[in-house]
Image (cartoon, rainbow, N blue to C red):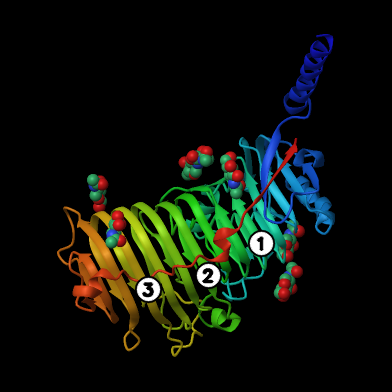
Amino acid sequence: MASQTQVIINLCFWALLFVMAQGGYAGEVVEYPALTRCRAHTASVTDFGAVGDGKTSNTKAFQAAVAHLAQYSSDGGSLLYVPAGRWLTGPFNLTSAFTLFLHRDAVILASQDINEWRVIDPLPSYGRGRDKAGGRYTSLIMGTNLTDVILTGDNGTIDGQGEFWWQKFHKNQLKYTRGYLVELMYTDQILISNLTFLNSTNWNIHPVYSSNIIVKGITILAPVHSPNTDGINPDSCSNVLIENNYIVSGDDCIAIKSGWDEYGIAFGMPSEHIVIKRLTCISPTSAAIAVGSEMSGGVRNVRAEDITAINTESGVRLKTAIGRGNYIKDIYVRGMNLNTMKWVFWMTGNYKSHPDGKFDPKAIPEVNGISYSNVVAQNVTMAGRLDGIENAPFKGICLSNVTVHMAMKAKKLSWECTNIEGVSKGVSPRPCDALEVQSGRDELTACPFPPERLPIEDIEFKQCSYST
Ligand SMILES: *[C@@H]1O[C@H](CO)[C@@H](O)[C@H](O)[C@H]1NC(C)=O
Ligand SMILES: *[C@@H]1O[C@H](CO)[C@@H](O)[C@H](O)[C@H]1NC(C)=O
Ligand SMILES: *[C@@H]1O[C@H](CO)[C@@H](O)[C@H](O)[C@H]1NC(C)=O
Ligand SMILES: *[C@@H]1O[C@H](CO)[C@@H](O)[C@H](O)[C@H]1NC(C)=O
Ligand SMILES: *[C@@H]1O[C@H](CO)[C@@H](O)[C@H](O)[C@H]1NC(C)=O
Ligand SMILES: *[C@@H]1O[C@H](CO)[C@@H](O)[C@H](O)[C@H]1NC(C)=O
Ligand SMILES: *[C@@H]1O[C@H](CO)[C@@H](O)[C@H](O)[C@H]1NC(C)=O
């Protein structure tokens, strides 16, 4: 009997100690995912003097924290914790084998002191900034030549405070191209998950010349008329998985790119092996997913599945032009549920933006093998507008199992097609003649979608934890 009482008392003692360690003394237990290994070293941004009052500049604290943790890149890796608070900061760089973790009530606020935004070289595959010729402002959170970089949290927020930049952009008061919220260049193994991105200065998430990238479970919010607030833009990237994301933006929710005209052709790095699943998009003036317009390194093997778009201009849109060169091929789309769209299908071979007058008029992009199946759309102004390039038609376009319900105020003409070739099966309303209607046995064969998964779809995360 006595020993039983002893055991119970002992248990109570240890249970109490455990509860105190979790809650009272050591703080919260934070669970975080890892791609390769749990981080051996951790620090809080407050260890470097950061103040979360929304007013104090923490640029030096973030920079000092990363500089300190960089020593662990080849020694177990590190995690930088951002606790609850409003952390104003200018741009800072990341390091390898590094996790940035934001508490659910942590908000990183982008500085509005333009002197904090250094000017860096344009991307080699673009030759110039997109807003302005010449260099460009650095991105808020930037990484170059890294491996194993994770931005995650418990749905903490990264707020670009974009209004400041949008107004200057509209008034033509900026000397350089606006920076992005996150840019990772030449980086292998990237995970961005469980965060909210607000009011970006320009594009939200820009991996470029990078590989093995997962963007999962994030929310991106920007006013639907804010300039160039694209959601996620893989640019000359390979092996990319973008899944379970919710995006409201003033530009394309996702845009797949690979450099601009002669600069992109010379750089020669395609975007390939890209999977997009379970995207929800609202973007009244742009596409749920755009391929291009800058695609001069080529874009191939893109699979988009379970796409929901509401009040969005178009579904999966192709944008290219003479001078871009290279190709857009093997684009597979399966399962789109769309409501209130201007065009369900939209392809443009005459998207006229060029970096300068030096583009090669003989650099004609090849567009081939574009499949869409299982599409339902409501309240649509025009079902499809498919315009290829004269003497270089877009080929291998396939549409199957498509039901488009036109809006009350729809255009009289549901489809308009020029310079395209392809087939259609089970499409309503009846498509343009260029999409030869297949009937009989062929009608039962859906447009192609590769049966095998890509390796990036089967990555399993390690579950790690630490006490704050
Ligand atoms: C961040 O990295 C970029 C590219 O390597 C570099 O130009 C810039 O000076 C770095 N910024 C800081 C604040 O260290
Ligand atoms: C990153 O790597 C590229 C390609 O290897 C190289 O040209 C560039 O100088 C490197 N940049 C930095 C900042 O290390
Ligand atoms: C994350 O926060 C955003 C913005 O407050 C919210 O819309 C979204 O639903 C949240 N996501 C999760 C998974 O809680
Ligand atoms: C985002 O920016 C818009 C326009 O300036 C502003 O109205 C809105 O409050 C901002 N959102 C947040 C959550 O700060
Ligand atoms: C995202 O958050 C959910 C819910 O908190 C968690 O179960 C999951 O492991 C997280 N995933 C990633 C990849 O961060
Ligand atoms: C249909 O689309 C129009 C805009 O084209 C919009 O004003 C209207 O609210 C939509 N109706 C429904 C039922 O979604
Ligand atoms: C056609 O598409 C609908 C909805 O998009 C889907 O439910 C249905 O299973 C598809 N039919 C075939 C034969 O794949």
Residue 86 in the image, given as x and y percentages of width and height: 65, 37
Residue beneath the point at 31% across and 54% down? 338
Q: Which numbered disc, 3 or 2, marks the residue that appears first in the sequence?
A: 2
Whether residue 205 is visible to the viewer of this picture, yes or no, is yes
Q: For label 1, count other residues whose C-alpha is less than 10 Å away and answer few (under 14), some (14-19) or many (20+).
A: many
Residue on which disc 2 sits: 273
What kind of residue is marked 2?
His
For label 2, the SS is strand
Residue on which disc 1 sits: 189
Quadrant of the snapshot with the C terminus: top right
Q: Is mark 1 within 8 Å of ligand 5?
A: no
Residue beneath the point at 18% across and 62% down? 411
Seen from this angle, which residue lies furthest front?
1
Residues 170 and 131: in front is 131
Q: Which numbered disc, 1 or 3, marks the residue that appears first in the sequence?
A: 1
For label 1, the SS is strand
Residue on which disc 3 sits: 370
The answer to whether residue 187 is above or below residue 432 is: above
Q: For label 2, count other residues whose C-alpha is less than 10 Å away and answer few (under 14), some (14-19) or many (20+).
A: many
Residues 10 and 448: in front is 10
Q: Quadrant of residue 369?
A: bottom left
Residue 435 in the image, given as x and y percentages of width and height: 24, 76
Q: For label 3, count other residues whose C-alpha is less than 10 Å away and answer few (under 14), some (14-19) or many (20+).
A: many
Answer left or right for 49 relative to 140.
Answer: right
For label 3, the SS is strand
Quadrant of the snapshot with the N terminus: top right
